[in-house]
Image: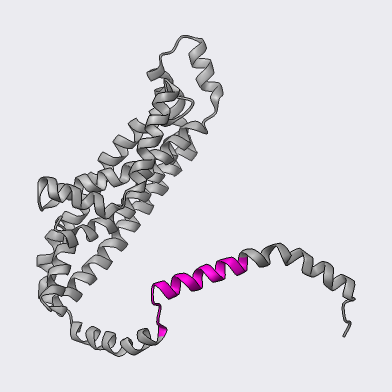
Amino acid sequence: MSVPAPGAMRLHLKKFRKYVAPALVATLLLWGASTVCRVDLGALLAGMPRGVALFGHMLPPRWEDFPALAGPALETVQIASVGTVLGAVLALLIALAAAGNLSPHRAVRELARGALTAERALPDLIIILFFVAIVGLGAFPGVMALAVCSVGMLGKLFADAFEEVDPKPLEAMAAVGATRAQIIRYAVLPQVFPSLIANTLYRFDVNIRMSIFLGVVGAGGIGFNLVMSMRLLRYQEAFAAILVILVLVVMCEQLSDALRRRVLGQEVLR
């Protein structure tokens, strides 16, 4: 077995020297954060039997509750659907102002970009609680919260997609006297339509999960049934709600993937 020469080993180690300091800093930061957060694997292992016991209390699920959970599950899908559509429309309008190649003025672009950044900086829970405080409990504050939460992400993605379009069609239409609205309709949107649809469907997947969380703060949907069952120690009812949530998420993901393939496939054929 051949042994590398010392010079060759030193050259090999020099290649990795620049990674040593960042790795040490990252390790120290991770260790410090774990200490502050009181990460205790021993406590986790000690609590595992209690988790197993809790799962045992959930079995078997209350099968007779499944018909009653269909309504809240449908409400969850409706909240996510309406919130996603409203958020996508608002994001599209703001993205047109935030895109550098479409914005009428730099100040308008900076203002739109700033609004999108501010929305993304706000935690989703703050936005949800804000609308619950304004309009009370129910599905409506959930719809508004999901719409606003969708604007920040979709607006940035839409604006970036607008800025990456081929400028030649835009310049050609501007040269023949087309209006800004006509340029956007016939030169911009056809180029970015697949991206807009794909990003909106992805946000719908996110909103399905968020709409379940909305029930925790009283904004309707099947999440409300789940949290109430847990608070009342009705674990079999809670497990039935969990199973419905799993089926709901899987079905919505499959539907979203099918729509994405269909829309993008049609665009490719064109």
Q: Position of residue 131 (x, y in %)?
A: 17, 47
Q: Position of residue 83 (x, y in %)?
A: 24, 45
Q: Residue at x 53, y 18 (%)?
A: 171
Is residue 25 rendered magenta in the image?
yes
- Quadrant of residue 15 within the rendered picture: bottom right
As drawn, 171 above or below 30: above
Camera-side residue: 257 or 83? Answer: 83
- Quadrant of residue 223 within the rendered picture: bottom left
Camera-side residue: 10 or 152? Answer: 10
Judge from the rendering whether residue 188 lies leftward or rightward of residue 89; answer left or right: right
Q: Residue at x 19, y 52 (%)?
A: 129
Judge from the rendering whether residue 122 lies leftward or rightward of residue 14; answer left or right: left
The number of discs equals 0
Residue 78 showing in the rendered view: no
Q: Residue at x 33, y 30 (%)?
A: 93
Position of the N terminus by quadrant: bottom right
As drawn, 180 above or below 146: above
Residue 214 showing in the rendered view: yes
Is residue 249 rendered magenta in the image?
no
Looking at the rendering, the stretch of residues picked out in magenta corresponds to 23-41
Judge from the rendering whether residue 255 lies leftward or rightward of residue 173; answer left or right: left
